[in-house]
Amino acid sequence: MTAMKTPVPDDLRAVRVAGRAIPDGMLGTLHEVDAAVARAAPATLAACLARHGHVLVRGGLDRRAVRAAREEVFARLAAVGEIAQPVADGVATGTSRRAELHPDAGAFWRGVCEGPRLRAVSHGARLGALAAAILGRPAIPFDFLWLRTMVGGRASPLHFDHVYMNRGSPDVLTAWIPLGDVPPEAGPILFVEGSNRFEDVVSRYRGLDVDRDAMPGSFPEDAIGFASARGARLLTSSFAAGDVLLFDMFSLHGSCDNVMEGDRVRLSCDVRWQPAADARDERWFGDPPPGHGGRGYGGLNGARPLGEAYAAR
Ligand SMILES: O=C(O)CCC(=O)C(=O)O
């Protein structure tokens, strides 16, 4: 496990949040465990997650399988004219024939999110073993998967996952999977350090449900604004294909901006795992899972043509 204050690699200073560099002293790296250590001492994973709210497992997944998932997703987007060849580079064309070729936006996006190569990674045995090691019990994934195609300038706002998925197990974990390398300029995921212990903030959000309570899940302020007011650091890292980050429902996170040149898309997915024996949030299980308000995959930003203006989440 990394020490509390690992030196910040110079290249990480390329990250941007709402167009701004993270001030000196506010930037730190995620807490990580190497996959070999995780295999030899699985308790390390649970200890890291309990303490920090997250654990980055370097090389926790099969790198070739992750690259195959990337190519599968981008090939589907190339078929609707949104991604240029070679698809592995993930370069957006700025055009789309998606609406014309697939009038049912939700069905198209569901097909992409249920691709066999993607599911082999997100719902596969390697990730299942990591989730079970952390939970200390057999684990199952949600059927629903959140696939993120982040074009230039785009980022995810600050939020707790709890408010989106708290109707079943109290022990849900999110696995954030970069589908390919995600260098700092691609806009990696970002955490507010120690937020899993910000009881004053956590208690305001515990039990809230974005659908039942018709409330926005994301915070109004950006990560730098929140962290400055709180005197907290922001933690992120550079990711390679095969890395996976697991975190709990009360770790405040969003993403850095995609500031890559050349219209390159940051591709990642997030998938939830929980104890197999626990109650399930009905929105995220089923064939198809109903999703928010019964909108299924059609309710996601990803269901819209790549690059189209979209709502916060
Ligand atoms: O990938 C992103 O931009 C955000 C991911 C996220 O919010 C999550 O995994 O819960």
Image (cartoon, rainbow, N blue to C red):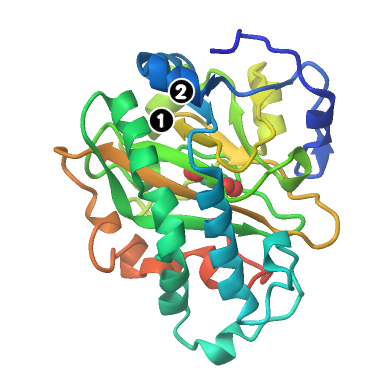
Q: What residue is at 39 percent from the left and 65 percent from the top?
A: 114
SS state under label 1: loop
Q: Name the residue rendered at 36%, 61% in the picture.
A: 292
Specify whether tag 2 is near ligand 1 (CB below 8 Å).
Answer: no
Q: Which of 295 and 152 is in front in this view?
A: 152
Q: What element carries label 2?
A: loop
Please tell me which residue is depicted at 56% across the width and 44% down the height of the picture: 63
Percent across and percent down for residue 65 are 50, 51
Residue 7 quadrant: top right
State the CA–CA distance, disc 1 to disc 2. Answer: 6 Å
User: What amino acid is labelled 1 in the image?
Assistant: Asp
Which tag, 1 or 2, sits closer to the chain's start?
2
Residue 50 appears in the figure: no
Taking the image as four quarters, which one is ligand 1 found in?
Answer: top right
Residue closer to the observer: 27 or 139: 139
Residue tagged by mark 2? Answer: 53
Location of residue 149 by image quarter? bottom right
Tag 1 residue: 248
Q: In percent of the image, x 16 and y 42: which residue is there?
A: 279
Q: Which amino acid lies under the numbered mark 2 shown in the image of this protein?
A: Gly
Query: Which of these two is toward me, 156 or 268?
Result: 268
Position of residue 243 in the picture relative to residue 278 (left or right):
right
Cβ of mark 1 under 8 Å from ligand 1: the answer is no
Can residue 102 be seen in the rendering of this structure? yes
Residue 162 placement (x, y as % from top left): 38, 38
Contact? badges 1 and 2 (CB < 8 Å): yes
